[in-house]
């Protein structure tokens, strides 16, 4: 089963890649690695939710936002590669979480992104990861996800 078929089986729709909102590109390929720019939880061209974890959103809501971010990162990969079966492995994921003071569940929020990648890519979707609390993210996004993929 291809990753695209797996996404469909999960009841998800792979969106078109989100256009950059600044002076950068969505992906950069060097050798057999593709780096994605940070992806926020954009759905149908607009930010799905805003705010900080621990004040405006709970951990479960943050996890859902991280899942949307990861799906957008996968869409960026598809835009670069043409087909997701060219992904050999998701190497590293960084999840930035807009966090209120005292919020300490960044890792649980980041699981939304990690779980999606494992569901879509299987063993090749398991990766190293950092989950980092931030005071604020662009556009007041609650979560931002970037990843590095090894590709064929």
Image: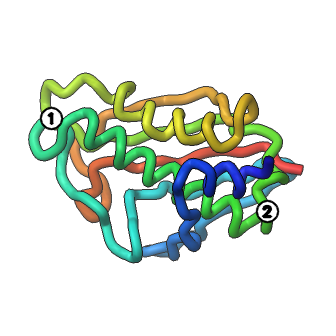
151 or 3, which lies in front? 3
Residue 21 is situated, as x and y percent measured from the top left of the image, at: 43, 74
Mark 2 surroundings: few (<14), some (14-19) or many (≥20) residues within 10 A: some
From the viewer's perspective, tell me whether residue 30 is left or right of residue 73.
right
Residue furthest to the right in view is 152
Which residue is rendered at x = 52% and y = 34% of the image?
Answer: 115
Location of residue 24 (image quadrant): bottom right
Distance CA(mark 1)–CA(mark 2):
37 Å
Residue 100 is situated, as x and y percent measured from the top left of the image, at: 15, 36
Residue 82 is situated, as x and y percent measured from the top left of the image, at: 79, 68
Mark sitting on residue 83: 2
Q: Is residue 16 above or below residue 130?
A: below
Which residue is rendered at x = 33% and y = 73% of the image?
Answer: 46
Q: Is residue 139 above or below residue 31?
A: below
From the viewer's perspective, tell me whether residue 96 is left or right of residue 58.
right
Location of residue 22 (image quadrant): bottom left
Residue 25 is situated, as x and y percent measured from the top left of the image, at: 59, 70
From the viewer's perspective, tell me whether residue 3 is left or right of residue 65.
right
At mark 1, the secondary structure is loop
- Residue highlighted by disc 1: 54
């Amino acid at each position: 089963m291809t990753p695209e078929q797996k996404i469909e089986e999960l009841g998800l729709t792979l969106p078109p890649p989100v256009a950059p909102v600044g002076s950068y590109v969505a992906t950069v390929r060097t050798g057999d690695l593709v780096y994605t720019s940070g992806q926020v939880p954009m759905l149908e061209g607009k930010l799905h939710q805003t705010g900080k974890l621990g004040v405006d959103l709970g951990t479960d809501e943050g996890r859902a936002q991280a899942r949307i971010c990861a799906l957008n990162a996968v869409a960026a990969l598809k835009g670069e590669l043409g087909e997701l079966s060219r992904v050999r492995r998701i190497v590293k994921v960084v999840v930035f979480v807009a966090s209120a003071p005292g919020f300490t569940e960044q890792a649980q929020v980041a699981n939304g992104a990690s779980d999606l990648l494992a569901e879509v890519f299987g063993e090749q979707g398991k990766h190293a990861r950092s989950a980092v609390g931030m005071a604020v993210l662009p556009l007041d996004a609650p979560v931002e996800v970037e990843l590095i993929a090894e590709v064929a």
